[in-house]
């Protein structure tokens, strides 16, 4: 994984000193809240319903065991003993005191972490495939690309004050596990007919109040041209993006209003004007970054593990966990492990300090000291020997990290909602908790099969509800919490925005409504068919009569 050089370390340490002075002036009254607000947001500090919230960057979702331990320490020392992993592959602390924030930033800097550009109208944390560098279907590890973009975009003088926040995702696999089509810019690593690696460039995706799937504006971009081409895209957006209306300021609106082809031509014209050679990353810098992502020293192992097979036979709970929470690895004898942060009755994405330490220790023992955070609010150990899976599972089980539900109905994505967020109009966490309790039976979950439920507590869609197979949007209706449902969303390479099902449901009725949807799916599915496949085959009407059978 990437390690700071002298410049990186000095950069974050100087920012800590700057913020310490800014916070001191705010606490003394020398700065008003209005003056302080843009300064704190540049350092990932939000003022939420009950306290300050600090959002910490985890670039492309990769962190070391030492960094995870530091996150655990911070949660105990400065928060309430837990952290919340987000859909941006970051972590948030929800109970922060302003007078202690600079100390937190200093603690983060001591392990090469920061909170810079996790908020504000800038290029946010670049996200990626949590199985990067390990996945069996991967063309190339996309994380060096993510790191290159991070370095290019950090405090870029032209792009630090954009019309609106800007999000980039990159994947190195034909199977999209980074939701690239739902981003302002999505990059898919592909091979052309000559076998050369490059990028498919997708622009104008995004969720929020106007959800859109991104449009391909370059079918193949050579790798060496990435930064100049991104520069051209950002310049066009910075020049033409709306600044008079924040609801129409995202690049998706610009692409929609300008038109896909005119936007593409404008980018190509801007690109033709650039000095591509001077803007491209030097080859030696690209090589330096790539060297930090060299694969670990994997052993030459047989594909099958006798110890793994014996453990599955001896322990049925382990067998079930292994069937759901493992992901194919490129190397024989290895696998990637998903550590679910979705226990029955729990808040999705939350991890206690003790759980973070257990995950860090597991990484040290069995995964080369490296962890990943997923945009689905779980953790991943990317490189684990199959021989080591059973002792790993036992350690996770001892910390309540053994939920066998990856990709199943209880693997729910949810934003913090009205329990914490000042923008929220309804609660998300209690709905997620009740759903996990309703579908808690492991056998029932496996019978239902792959089913993605995503919940947002307001129209800003931080819970990605638009691209859930079942999406839930919490709203306020005459002072009461009210939930709209969308069906058929998809974050993958076949991305789609979910269709609104119809009238919404009360907080008391929404879980029953979801169960009716699931029951109807089980009635009408064909053998081996998933919920999304059934929905695409039969359409919304086949679900609506069941959904509204008891409404009202």
Image (tube, helix red, strand yellow):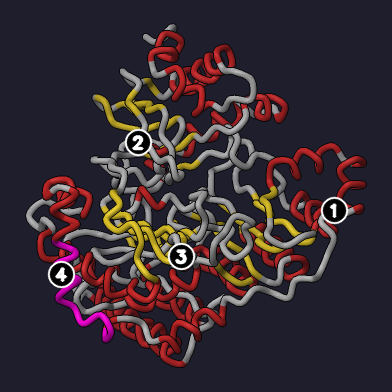
Upstream in sequence: badge 4 or badge 3: 3
Provide the residue span drawn in magenta.
266-278
Residue 520 percent coordinates (x, y)? 52, 14
The label shown at residue 497 is 2
Q: Determine if residue 81 is in view.
A: no
Determine whether 5 is above or below 452 in the image: below
Upstream in sequence: badge 2 or badge 4: 4
Alpha-carbon distance for marks 1 and 3?
35 Å
Upstream in sequence: badge 2 or badge 3: 3
Upstream in sequence: badge 1 or badge 3: 3
**Residue under numbered circle 1:** 304
Choose between 525 and 127: the one closer to the eye.
525
Q: Nearer the viewer, mark 2 or mark 3?
A: 3
Alpha-carbon distance for marks 2 and 4?
31 Å
Crowding around mark 4 (Cα neighbors within 10 Å: few <14, some 14 to 19, many 20+) is: some
Alpha-carbon distance for marks 1 and 2?
40 Å
Alpha-carbon distance for marks 4 and 3?
27 Å
Upstream in sequence: badge 1 or badge 2: 1
**Residue under numbered circle 4:** 270
Q: Secondary structure at mark 2?
A: loop
Crowding around mark 3 (Cα neighbors within 10 Å: few <14, some 14 to 19, many 20+) is: few
**Residue under numbered circle 3:** 194
The answer to whether the residues at label 2 and label 4 have Cβ atoms under 8 Å apart is no
* Outermost residue toward the left in this view: 244
Q: Quadrant of residue 1?
A: bottom right
Q: Secondary structure at mark 3?
A: loop
Q: Nearer the viewer, mark 1 or mark 2?
A: 1
Crowding around mark 1 (Cα neighbors within 10 Å: few <14, some 14 to 19, many 20+) is: few
Q: Secondary structure at mark 1?
A: loop
The answer to whether the residues at label 1 and label 4 have Cβ atoms under 8 Å apart is no
């Amino acid at each position: 994984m990437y390690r700071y050089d002298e410049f990186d370390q000095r950069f974050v340490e100087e920012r800590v000193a700057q913020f310490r002075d800014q916070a001191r002036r705010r606490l003394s009254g020398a700065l008003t809240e209005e003056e302080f607000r843009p300064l704190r947001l540049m350092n990932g500090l939000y003022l939420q319903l009950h306290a300050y919230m600090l959002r910490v960057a985890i670039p492309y979702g990769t962190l070391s065991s030492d960094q995870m331990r530091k996150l655990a320490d911070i949660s105990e020392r400065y928060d309430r003993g837990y952290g919340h992993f987000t859909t941006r592959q970051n972590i948030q602390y929800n109970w922060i005191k302003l007078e202690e924030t600079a100390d937190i930033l200093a603690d983060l800097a001591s392990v090469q972490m920061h909170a810079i550009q996790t908020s504000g109208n800038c290029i946010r944390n670049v996200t990626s495939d949590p199985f990067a560098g390990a996945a069996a279907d991967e063309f190339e590890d996309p994380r060096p690309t993510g790191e290159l973009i991070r370095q290019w975009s950090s405090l870029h003088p032209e792009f630090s004050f954009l019309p609106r926040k800007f999000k980039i995702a990159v994947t190195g696999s034909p199977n999209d596990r980074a939701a690239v089509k739902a981003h302002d810019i999505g990059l898919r690593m592909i091979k052309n007919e000559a076998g050369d690696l490059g990028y498919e460039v997708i622009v104008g995706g995004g969720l929020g109040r106007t959800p859109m799937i991104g449009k391909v504006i370059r079918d193949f971009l050579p790798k060496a041209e990435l930064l100049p081409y991104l520069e051209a895209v950002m310049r066009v957006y910075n020049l033409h993006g709306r600044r008079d209306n924040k609801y129409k300021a995202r690049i998706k609106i610009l692409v929609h209003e300008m038109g896909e082809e005119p936007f593409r031509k404008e980018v190509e014209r801007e690109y033709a004007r650039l000095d591509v050679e001077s803007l491209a990353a030097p080859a030696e810098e690209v090589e330096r970054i790539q060297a930090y992502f060299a694969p670990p020293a994997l052993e030459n192992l047989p594909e099958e593990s006798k110890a793994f097979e014996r453990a599955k036979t001896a322990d049925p709970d382990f067998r079930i966990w292994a069937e759901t929470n493992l992901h194919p690895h490129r190397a024989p004898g290895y696998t990637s492990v998903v550590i679910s942060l979705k226990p029955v009755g729990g808040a999705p994405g939350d991890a206690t300090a003790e759980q973070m330490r257990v995950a860090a220790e597991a990484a040290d023992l069995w995964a080369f000291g490296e962890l990943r955070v997923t945009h689905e609010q779980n953790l991943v150990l990317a490189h684990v020997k199959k021989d080591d899976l059973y002792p790993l599972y036992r350690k996770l089980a001892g910390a309540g990290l053994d939920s066998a539900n990856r990709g199943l109905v209880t693997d729910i994505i949810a934003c913090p909602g009205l329990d914490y967020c000042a923008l929220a109009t309804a609660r998300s966490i209690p709905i997620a908790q009740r759903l996990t309790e309703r579908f808690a039976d492991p056998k029932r979950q496996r019978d239902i099969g792959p089913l993605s439920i995503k919940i947002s507590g307001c129209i800003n869609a931080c819970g990605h509800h638009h691209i859930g197979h079942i999406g839930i949007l919490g709203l306020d209706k005459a002072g009461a919490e009210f939930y709209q449902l969308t069906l058929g969303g998809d974050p993958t390479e076949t991305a789609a925005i979910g269709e609104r099902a119809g009238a919404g449901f009360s907080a008391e009725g929404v879980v029953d409504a979801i169960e009716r949807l699931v029951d109807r799916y089980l009635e009408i599915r064909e053998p081996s068919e998933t919920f999304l496949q059934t929905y695409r085959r039969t359409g919304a009407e086949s679900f609506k009569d069941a959904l509204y059978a008891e409404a009202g």
